Image (tube, rainbow, N blue to C red):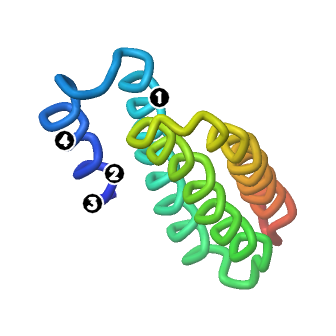
């Protein structure tokens, strides 16, 4: 969350006058997904307290971190460098994020006592 807030502040105050509007939109998308999925990692951590034997949560956390790095990371890099082919990495991160949420859902549904 610290990095997400710092990236958002950097974009709002340091990049707004430097980046072209289309690249600023890309940067803001990276920040939004970064914040949402940082919260997602907190949710996974809290669920793991209540479902300590749910191995799916560990996989979900790992996939969410990888997804964040690939999705938001590629968008940050694209917006700051202007190198458009970096956008080809973004969907891989998106798939990892989707898979992470699927695993969170499966962990909750299959948990004993739920």
Alpha carbon separation for disc pair 3 and 2: 5 Å
Residue on which disc 3 sits: 2
The label on residue 26 is: 1
The label on residue 9 is: 4
Of labels 1 and 3, the one closer to you: 1
- Left or right, 100 with reference to 68: right
- Front-lying residue, 59 or 13: 13
Q: Residues within 10 Å of mark 4 (few under 14, many from 20)?
A: few
Tell me if label 3 and label 2 are in contact, CB under 8 Å.
yes
Of labels 1 and 2, the one closer to you: 1
Q: How many marks?
A: 4
Q: Quadrant of residue 14?
A: top left
Alpha carbon separation for disc pair 2 and 4: 9 Å
Give the answer, above or below, for where 14 lies relative to 25: below
Q: Residues within 10 Å of mark 2 (few under 14, many from 20)?
A: some
- Front-lying residue, 7 or 35: 7
Q: Residue furthest left?
A: 13
Which residue is found at the position 31% from the left and 58% from the top?
3
């Amino acid at each position: 969350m610290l990095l997400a807030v710092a990236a958002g502040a950097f974009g709002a105050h340091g990049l707004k006058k430097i980046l072209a509007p289309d690249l600023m939109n890309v940067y803001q998308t990276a920040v939004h997904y970064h914040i949402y999925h940082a919260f997602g990692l907190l949710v996974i951590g809290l669920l793991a307290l209540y479902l300590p034997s749910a191995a799916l949560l560990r996989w979900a956390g790992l996939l969410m971190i990888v997804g964040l790095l690939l999705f938001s990371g590629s968008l940050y890099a694209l917006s700051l460098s202007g190198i458009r082919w970096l956008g080809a990495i973004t969907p891989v991160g998106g798939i990892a994020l989707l898979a992470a949420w699927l695993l969170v859902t499966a962990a909750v549904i299959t948990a004993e006592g739920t």
